[in-house]
Image (cartoon, grey):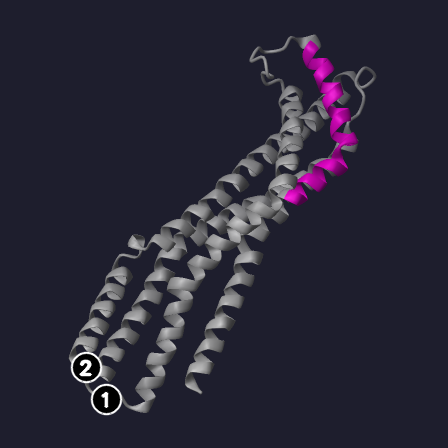
């Protein structure tokens, strides 16, 4: 009977070692990467939208400078758009950093999970030795094996679960405000495209009169809705941070404390 149990421990150790060599075979890792990719796609789309607005505002200021030299009496100055331009540029930099962080997280999940499964394989192999030959494992090695179990659970099991559950929970909690913020940002992006002369919703290039009218209307809109634009982008950034860092980190901490509590109760 003891030999059979030891053989089962060895089979489990071999499976963990296989997942350490091929972490992509882990269903939890695939799901965690998919959740990280969802945040990456959303943050990248927000970054593109903010850069479109930033380009429109920069274009407006360039037109103002050129026109002030050629026909300063015929064109109203638009230097008051500069604070809005600077704010959008800073926020877009934060969104870009979040997109890069999400990509880094997605890439690092594989190696981190592989280390976790390797630690689990070490613990399971040690359990096989403990079962087959009781007393053969010295106390120092036993402590190493127990710590390998904790490390393996944290990296290979708890971390992907925390990422999956945290992202899903964050998406559910912020779905309504994020959808409203994205709709308002998309509306301002449409005005930005009109400002720089890109085709609007009809797909047709506007004439010079339509362009001039859209230019003045869009410039005024940017100033009037600067506060709303900042609030909406802050909502989007907060949603990404909540889904990517805060909720997964909190869930990982809770799961880890539960594991430690169970391990402490088992050792008593």
Q: Quadrant of residue 90?
A: top right
**Relative to residue 104, is residue 5 drawn left or right?**
left
Q: Whole-Å distance between the Cαs marked 1 and 2? A: 10 Å
Determine which residue is flagged by label 1. Answer: 134
Q: Residues within 10 Å of mark 1 (few under 14, many from 20)?
A: few
Local SS, label 1 = loop
Labelled disc at residue 108: none
Q: Is residue 79 visible?
A: no
Q: Is residue 230 visible?
A: yes
Q: Quadrant of residue 86?
A: top right
Task: Find residue 70 and report its horizontal and vertical position in percent.
Answer: 75, 17
Q: Residues within 10 Å of mark 2 (few under 14, many from 20)?
A: few
Residue farthest to the right? 73
User: Does residue 123 lie above or below 202 as drawn?
Assistant: below
User: Does residue 44 lie above or below 190 as drawn?
Assistant: below
Tell me if residue 232 is in the magenta stretch.
yes
Local SS, label 2 = helix
Task: Find residue 21 and report its horizontal and vertical position in percent.
Answer: 25, 60
**Mainly helix, strand or loop, the magenta region?**
helix
Tally of numbered tags: 2
Residue at the image point whose x is 27% and y is 79% from the top: 127
The quadrant of the image that shows the N terminus is bottom left
Task: Find residue 238 and report its horizontal and vertical position in percent.
Answer: 63, 49
Residue at the image point whose x is 42% and y is 85% from the top: 267
User: Does residue 70 lie above or below 141 as drawn?
Assistant: above
Q: Which residues are magenta?
A: 210-235
Q: Of residues 255 and 89, which is closer to you in this image?
A: 255
Labelled disc at residue 2: 2
């Amino acid at each position: 009977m003891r030999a059979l149990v030891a053989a089962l421990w060895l089979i489990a150790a071999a499976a963990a070692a296989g997942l350490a060599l091929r972490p992509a075979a882990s269903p939890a890792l695939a799901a965690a990467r998919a959740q990280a990719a969802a945040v990456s796609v959303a943050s990248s789309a927000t970054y593109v939208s903010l850069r479109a607005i930033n380009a429109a505002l920069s274009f407006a200021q360039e037109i103002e400078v050129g026109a002030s030299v050629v026909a300063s009496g015929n064109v109203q100055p638009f230097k008051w758009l500069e604070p809005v331009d600077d704010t959008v540029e800073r926020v877009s930099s934060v969104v870009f950093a979040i997109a890069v962080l999400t990509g880094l997280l997605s890439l690092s999940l594989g190696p981190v999970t592989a280390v976790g499964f390797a630690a689990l394989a070490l613990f399971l192999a040690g359990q096989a030795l403990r079962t087959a030959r009781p007393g053969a494992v010295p106390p120092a090695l036993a402590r190493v094996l127990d710590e390998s179990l904790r490390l393996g659970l944290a990296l290979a099991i708890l971390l992907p679960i925390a990422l999956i559950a945290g992202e899903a929970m964050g998406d559910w909690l912020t779905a309504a405000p994020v959808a409203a913020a994205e709709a308002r940002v998309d509306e301002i992006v449409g005005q930005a495209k009109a400002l720089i002369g890109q085709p609007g919703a009809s797909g047709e290039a506007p004439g010079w009169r339509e362009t001039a009218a859209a230019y003045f209307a869009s410039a005024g809109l940017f100033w009037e809705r600067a506060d709303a634009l900042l609030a909406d982008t802050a909502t989007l950034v907060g949603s990404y941070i909540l889904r990517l860092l805060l909720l997964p980190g909190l869930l990982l901490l809770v799961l880890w404390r539960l594991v430690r509590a169970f391990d402490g109760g088992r050792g008593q």
